[in-house]
Amino acid sequence: MQSTVLILGARGRFGLAAARAFADAGWHVQGLMRPGAQVPAEAENDNRIKWVSADLQDTAAVARAAQGACVVVHALNPVYTHKAWKAQALPMTEAAIDITRALNATLMFMGNIYNFGADMPAVVSEDTPQRARTVKGQIRIAMEEQIRRSGARAIVIRAGDFFGSGKGTWFDQVIAKDIQKGKFTYPGHKGVATAWAYLPDLARTFAEVAARRDTLKTFEVFHFGGHRITGQQWLDAIQPIAQAQGWVKPNAALQYSQFPWPIIRIGALFVPTWASLLEMRYLWDKAHALDNRKLVALLGAEPHTALAQAVTMALKDLDFTKDAVAAQATLVSAR
């Protein structure tokens, strides 16, 4: 019998990637969207996703529309400001818990590394002490605790920064923003390695863990290892693609520049989103990786796309590259 998953926030970047991954794995997929919202353009022709229109806070209506769902994926996120997170993050999570209970399902939550704070070790495991002092870090801790205390069956999977499958992260908004002009911008130090998640791999991981949910305890936390990448490794991965695409002259290097943190610091006094970015700057200065041994023990292997191929596909998703040239660049960079 085909299992059903309900994706809360299916119109968002991770939500849509998760919907596709579950569909690829043979699940019946239902994507929740608020009344009056439109199906995202990139999903209009994907008839594997059934779109459910209902108010998130109307538990009964959502449960009726998604009757039979055995997994609920929490892919909801407020706007990236302190005010929005303080007002919306916990109520959204409570709504997800209520829906999960009404469906007698398992809740899956997309966690991240904000929980651990600036004193986190170089390799972070599931039981690393959570000492975040930032606004979003403390809210993230509270969200996970809210889920744990609810008693609902739940799985948290934490991951690093996203890249691939569209727009909305540091990769497309900063690193690759001007790459077609031959410019590479990086928010951190070239030699500091940080945790990254290629979104199709992470979404596939959710589907694979969901298939094993009955073997797990009531509340489980896993870390997705993904890629541990320095600024120099990003540059090395993109450089051959830039040459193949003609963004730089043959044998020429991309122009490297540092993200303008001083400007962000000044602008943070007036722009709430910039203030939120500034608070998380430590993540670019502190080398970190996620220990995925528990996840690997469950799955046998973590879904993983080689960096050269993942970068090529991520740029293709942004409509930056031409297929034939991009494929050749992948081969060159993989040598």
Image (spheres, helix red, strand yellow):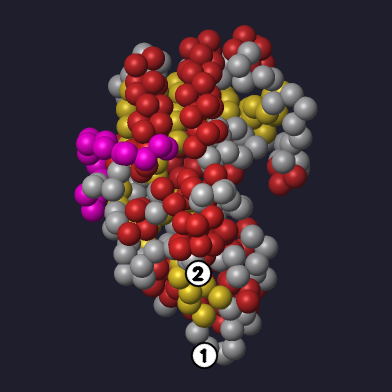
Counting from the top left corner in percent of width and height, residue 125 is at: 25, 42
Nearest to N terminus: mark 1 or mark 2: 2
Q: In which quarter of the image is residue 112?
A: top left
Counting from the top left corner in percent of width and height, residue 25 is at: 53, 38
Find the magenta span and give its range: 121-136
Queried whether the magenta region covers residue 147, the answer comes back as no
Main secondary structure type of the part rendered in magenta: loop
Residue at (71, 46) in percent of width and height:
42
Counting from the top left corner in percent of width and height, residue 56 is at: 62, 20
Question: Is 70 situated above or below 120?
Answer: above
Q: What element carries label 2?
A: strand
Considering the image in quadrants, where does the N terminus appear?
top right
Counting from the top left corner in percent of width and height, residue 151 is at: 36, 13
Residue 17 placement, left or right of 160:
right
Residue at (53, 18) in percent of width and height:
95
Q: Residues within 10 Å of mark 2 (few under 14, many from 20)?
A: many
Considering the image in quadrants, where does the C terminus appear?
bottom left
* Amino acid type of the residue that numbered disc 1 sits on in the rendered structure: Asn
Q: Nearer the viewer, residue 133 or 236?
A: 133
Question: Is 36 situated above or below 168?
Answer: above
Q: Name the residue under label 1.
A: 251
Residue 123 placement, left or right of 210:
left
Q: How crowded is mark 1: few (under 14 residues within 10 Å), some or many (20 or more)?
A: few
Residue at (51, 49) in percent of width and height:
269
